[in-house]
Image (tube, grey):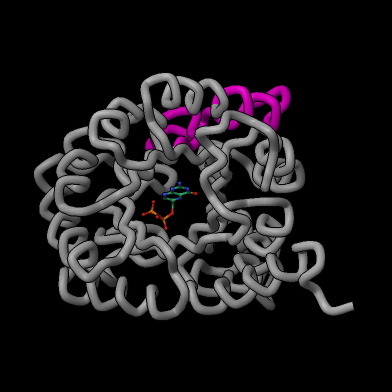
Amino acid sequence: MPGTGPEVALYCGCVTRVMGVLNVTPDSFSDGGRWLDPEAAVAHGREMAADGADIIDVGGESTRPGALPVSEAEELRRVLPVVEALADEGLTVSIDTRKASVARAAVAAGASIINDVSSELWPVAAETGAGWVAMHMPADPEVMQDHAHYDDVVAEVRAYLVQRAGEAVRAGVERVWIDPGIGFGKTAVHNLSLLRHLDELVGTGFPVLVGTSRKSFLGRLAPDADGAPSVASDRLEGTVATTTWAVTRGADVVRVHDVRPVSQAVRLAADSALPGTAAR
Ligand code: HH2
């Protein structure tokens, strides 16, 4: 069990959970346009669950660097049928949104976790009883890469998340995760620094969620044969390596597109890391 922080955060077991990404958007950086049809989206959610996803994270607005906001009506139109159908099938669904109205409607439709990259929606989690993910992002996606300036990225991200999570706990939210926001207003060096020092987030006692899946810093670290950054669809190795690293450092949830290979890798890594379970 990671850390010795607030008791409210200590509900989760030692088993790492895999959150499968389901973007119902035309423009997400790696799967934009693939799951716009609700039936295709629901089928993909089901497939990810069969492949080992414990949570299906449904999002209707891209938050890639430079992304423009989507209207409330459009976001609701994209996510609600998918959330409802997956929740009706008994799957654990999170809603990836920055809008209180979308979070509220998604919880009413069956989502049980609000995945909040803005870290501002804890009042909705308190009001609805949903779990809440607080992620670090220094500014809106449109301009966040202009804000990738830190004296000590690990200390600053940690302080921000502990403050937000504390607010949520005081407001009565019973399940709170913290997430360093890999790739959100951060350079590759910042991302690596946060991963290297993940134990400092784990040490807060709040369960930690990590999302490195297919992100651009992996493309730069593992270029293609011509030396150009690899494209999003060609970043599986980096995704497996970084999520496995995160699990062995104590991450509670990893958020990924490639559920099957990551599930297998992180569960093997988690089993090997538990004292007494690894073969000697
Ligand atoms: N990353 C993305 C979106 N939501 N939520 C959390 N908690 N942590 C993350 O790292 C995270 C997130 C970005 O990835 P993706 O959803 O694939 O892309 P897009 O924002 O373009 O839809």
Quadrant position of residue 3: top right
Left or right of 272 on screen, residue 117: left
Question: What residue is shown at x 64% (from left), y 24% (from top)?
Answer: 156
Residue 10, image x, y percentages: 56, 41
Residue 277 or 148: which is nearer the viewer?
277
| Residue extending farthest right | 280
* Residue drawn at point x = 73 percent, y = 58 percent: 248
> Is residue 197 shown above or below 279?
above
**201 is higher (above) or lower (below) than 18:** above
Q: Residue at x 69, y 78 (%)?
A: 225
**Which residue: 16% across, 71% down?**
37
Q: Does the magenta stretch include residue 127?
A: no
Q: Does the magenta stretch include residue 140?
A: yes
How many marks on residues?
0
Question: Which range of residues does the magenta coloring cover?
Answer: 134-160
In the image: residue 124, left or right of residue 158:
left
| Along the line of sight, the residue nearer the viewer: 193 or 261 | 261
Q: In which quarter of the image is residue 228?
A: bottom right
The quarter of the image holding the C terminus is bottom right
Residue 92 lies in what quarter of the image?
bottom left
Q: Is residue 117 left or right of residue 152?
A: left
x, y percentage for residue 69?
26, 40
Residue 14 image position (x, y, % from top left): 62, 56
